[in-house]
Image (spheres, helix red, strand yellow):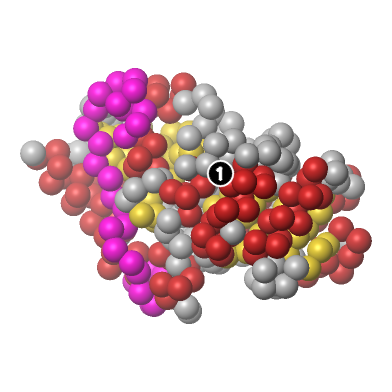
């Protein structure tokens, strides 16, 4: 498998690859064909492409109808336009009925705001979807993982939400690395002073922070969480058990995402100190790297937060 420029391209490539063998795969577009890099799909499979225009609620309802007829529709557009503008439809007509609709939300997080700023940065999407029963939530860490997540979603019986980015995602995984069904992949095991959990497109920064900490005498374990609020957290709990100091890092609001998930698991299974590194304010326009650094996601800031917390 070749590398992808970003998660949008990975999404479109996965759809194209699946469509060759699966006639049930259909694409629903709320005026998002170009944004989702899926023009080739629309041209090659015009009978399996439905354009709804700028009408996210109608797109979700259309997908629900097609799913009820036995098809597997994918709806892709900006994360907030799905989870906020069409939240009621995702809840009532897909979640409540447990229909086989797949959603891909792009431009998620602060890193997507280089051109549009706060109106097109979406760091509440996971909080919204995680409150809806029956949804499976995938948070791939890079384009290759997004490709595998899309293909994995097509195998799931029921609604799936996949969090995708804006094209500024750093490749971390090998392109052929599978999408972990356990929900967790351990990347570094320097020690058990703390466990750093990453979710989404900050994994490269968390790994760099772990290296900095090691140089400073703090030895941590780093793990990537790619499935939130999954049915079987057994292997995540095994990683959590390595230390009583847990840190979560995510390009999302501090509530409702990875930090809330790990905190819940700690409360229900093994009491531990959980420190959440996430967004507490709205974002702003700016280059992705500079924005991430400014909002506390630089490797240095992450490492400093870990050191300061452990000192307490």
Determine crowd level at label 1: few under 14, some 14-19, many 20+ residues with C-alpha closer than 10 A.
many
Nearest to the observer: residue 66 or residue 286: 66
- Residue that lies at the very extreme toward the left in this rendered image: 312
Nearest to the observer: residue 217 or residue 223: 223
Query: Quarter-wise, where is residue 95 in the image?
Result: top right
Answer whether residue 305 is visible to the viewer in this image: yes
Q: Residue at x 67, y 73 (%)?
A: 54
Q: Give the range drawn in magenta.
A: 263-290
Q: Is residue 84 left or right of residue 213?
A: right
Above/below status of 170 relative to 260:
below
> What is the quadrant of the C terminus in the image?
top left
Nearest to the observer: residue 228 or residue 148: 228
Measuring from the top left, give residue 3's x and y in whole percent: 65, 57
Q: In this view, does 208 lie to the left or right of 217?
A: right
Q: Which residue is drawn at 32% across and 51% down?
A: 254
Q: Residue at x 72, y 41 (%)?
A: 100
Residue carrying label 1: 138
Q: In this view, does 284 lie to the left or right of 153?
A: left
Measuring from the top left, give residue 244's x and y in whole percent: 23, 27
Q: What element carries label 1?
A: strand
Q: Residue at x 81, y 63 (%)?
A: 50
């Amino acid at each position: 498998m070749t590398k992808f420029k970003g998660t949008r391209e990975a999404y479109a490539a996965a759809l194209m690859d699946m469509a060759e063998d699966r006639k049930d795969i259909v694409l629903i577009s709320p005026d998002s064909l170009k944004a989702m890099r899926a023009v080739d799909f629309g041209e090659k499979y015009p009978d399996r492409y439905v354009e709804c225009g700028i009408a996210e609620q109608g797109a979700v309802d259309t997908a629900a109808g097609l799913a009820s007829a036995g098809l597997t529709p994918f709806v892709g557009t900006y994360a907030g336009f799905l989870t906020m503008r069409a939240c009621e439809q995702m809840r009532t007509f897909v979640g409540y009925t447990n229909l086989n609709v797949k959603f891909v939300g792009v431009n998620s997080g602060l890193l997507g705001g280089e051109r549009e700023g706060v109106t097109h940065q979406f760091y509440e999407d996971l909080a919204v979807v995680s409150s809806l029963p029956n949804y499976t939530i995938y948070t791939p860490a890079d384009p290759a993982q997004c490709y595998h997540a899309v293909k994995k979603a097509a195998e799931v019986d029921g609604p799936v939400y996949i969090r995708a980015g804006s094209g500024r995602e750093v490749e971390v995984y090998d392109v052929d690395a599978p999408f972990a069904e356990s929900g967790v992949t351990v990347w570094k095991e320097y020690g058990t002073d703390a466990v750093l959990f990453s979710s989404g497109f900050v994994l490269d920064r968390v790994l760099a922070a772990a290296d900095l900490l090691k140089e400073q005498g703090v030895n941590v374990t780093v793990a990537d969480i790619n499935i939130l609020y999954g049915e079987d957290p057994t292997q995540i709990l095994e990683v959590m058990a390595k230390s009583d100091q847990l840190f979560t890092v995510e390009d999302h609001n501090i509530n409702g995402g990875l930090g809330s998930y790990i905190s819940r698991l700690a409360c229900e299974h093994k009491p531990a100190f959980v420190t959440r590194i996430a967004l507490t304010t709205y974002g702003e326009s700016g280059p992705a790297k500079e924005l991430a650094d400014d909002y506390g996601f630089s490797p240095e800031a992450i490492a400093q937060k870990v050191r300061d917390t452990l000192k307490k």
